[in-house]
Amino acid sequence: VGECWSQGHATMMIMGEICTRGCSFCNVITGKPKALDVFEPGRVAHAVAKLGLNHVVLTSVDRDDLEDGGATHYASCIRAIKARTPEVVVEALTPDFDGDQAAIERVVDSGLEVFAQNVETVERLTSKVRDPRAGYRKTLDVLAHAKRHRPDVITKTSLMLGLGETEKEILQTFDDLR
């Protein structure tokens, strides 16, 4: 934390604290989320400016209760940050938006520099680790669509290790991601 803060980097969670999914690795509450806070984009932009950040990662709970999975809200937060502090690098670590390509495009087109969606684990362990609505192939498709739609935007993912995967499976995941 100290290293990130000293370099002007921070992660902020948007769209509430209750997730509509229940992945086994996560410690976020699963349930029925509250309505989105329409003032959140402005507050997030204010916080980024006040903290003097150089790089902000916006992450969130999954919001399957929303028509676009929260993509419009993500885009609003990103645009608010860029309007106030255009020099800040914005990374969006998003849900999969249930694979909705229009939702993915809405976020990718909002002015960010980095679009991320986590594959989380190797394909064999996905059903044990992730909520049934998530998916290994779905995440690959989300990342591929984001990159095809905006090749200039950096796409990235994360992979947890130590869950029983083999080296061969890790290498296969890297190949799949490539």
Image (spheres, rainbow, N blue to C red):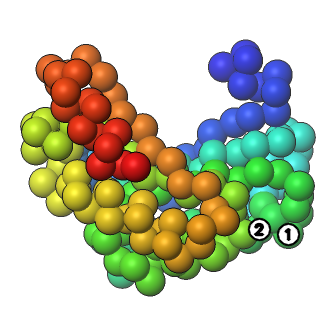
Horizontal placement of 95 versus 173: left or right?
Answer: right
Residue at position x 82%, y 22% in the image: 6
Q: Does the residue at mark 2 contact the one at mark 1 (Cβ under 8 Å)?
A: yes
| Residue beneath the point at 44% across and 44% down | 157
- Amino acid type of the residue that numbered disc 2 sits on in the rendered structure: Ala
Badge number at residue 83: 1
Q: Which residue in the structure is indicated by mark 2?
A: 80
Mark number displayed over residue 9: none
Helix, strand, or loop for circle 2?
Answer: helix
Q: Secondary structure at mark 1?
A: helix
Taking the image as shown, residue 74 lies to the left or right of residue 100, namely right
Expressed as whole percent of the image width and height from the top left, the position of residue 18 reads 36, 50
Q: Position of residue 8 (x, y in %)?
A: 82, 33
Residue at position x 87%, y 61% from top? 86
- Residue 176 lies, with reference to residue 72, above or below; the image says above
Against 160, residue 92 (above or below) is below
Mark-to-mark CA distance, 2 and 1: 5 Å
